[in-house]
Image (tube, rainbow, N blue to C red):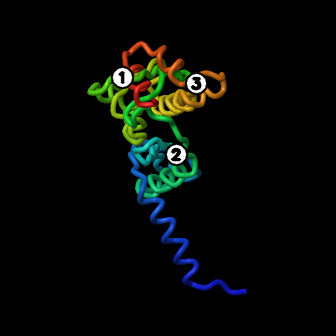
Amino acid sequence: MARSPEGRRGRDRNREERDSEFSDKLVHINRVAKVVKGGKRFGFAALVVVGDLKGRVGFGHGKAREVPEAIRKATESAKRDLIRVPLRDGRTLHHDTQGRHGAGKVIIRSAPPGTGIIAGGAMRAVFEMLGVQDVVAKSMGSSNPYNVVRATFDALKIQENPRNIATRRGMKVSDIVSRRSDGSAQAETSAEA
């Protein structure tokens, strides 16, 4: 049975629409060398973070002989491994977390409105693509962008929505949210009611 060209075009159009909703940011580019019999063969490795600015984010790594091709491969890889992170009011995280990967350690704290993204380099790219507007983050240990990004993702995977925690514990959302120390608990409990 032969495929019709219209069906294939429709699939490509759906892929383009899906890809257009994502933004990407190049975090790091590295020149790598492969030693061969005649000398060295140079290539490029790219680290890219992709997100929809609404709570979904992913990162990818790509290698190629040319920079644009390496970035394209990294972007494709990032789109395949997206994670969803629950955001509070669409602007910050629900709670403070820590993450680590290798020698890279990160501490991420939620912040009140107007704080902005206080984070360095690789972590800033992740938060911008995630759609977070207010967050305070500190990277300790390794400053290698690959380790920092992976440690940041390790911390973001721990994030949970208070509603999920409340259902798991058999409590009300207001009981869990009232324990927050930054004073935003009253605003959220009134919004829940």
Residue found farthest to the left? 114
Tag 2: residue type?
Gly
Residue 27, by quadrant, is top left
Which of marks 2 and 3 precedes in the sequence? 2
- Identify the mark nearer the N-term, 2 or 1: 2
In what element is the residue under mark 3? loop
In the rendered image, which quarter contains the C terminus? Answer: top left
In the rendering, which numbered label is found on residue 68? none
Residue picked out by circle 2: 60
Residue 102: mark: 3
Position of residue 33 measured from the top left corner of the image (x, y, whole percent): 50, 45
Hey, what amino acid is under mark 1?
A: Ala
Residue designated by label 1: 111
Looking at the image, the residue that sits furthest to the right is: 1
Q: Nearer the viewer, mark 1 or mark 3?
A: 1
Structural distance between the alpha carbons of marks 3 and 2? 18 Å
- Asked whether residue 36 is in view, the answer is yes
Q: Amino acid at mark 3?
A: Gly
Most foreground residue, 115 or 75 = 115
| Percent position of residue 56, x then y | 49, 44
Which of 21/170 is in front?
A: 170
Q: Nearer the viewer, mark 2 or mark 1?
A: 1
Using a 10 Å C-alpha cutoff, classify the residue at mark 3 as few (fewer than 14 neighbours), some (14 to 19) or many (20 or more): few
Q: Quadrant of the N terminus?
A: bottom right
Which of 31/88 is in front?
88
| Placement of 6 over or under 170, stated as above or below | below
- Residue 100 screen position, x and y as percent: 55, 23
Q: Is residue 28 visible?
A: no
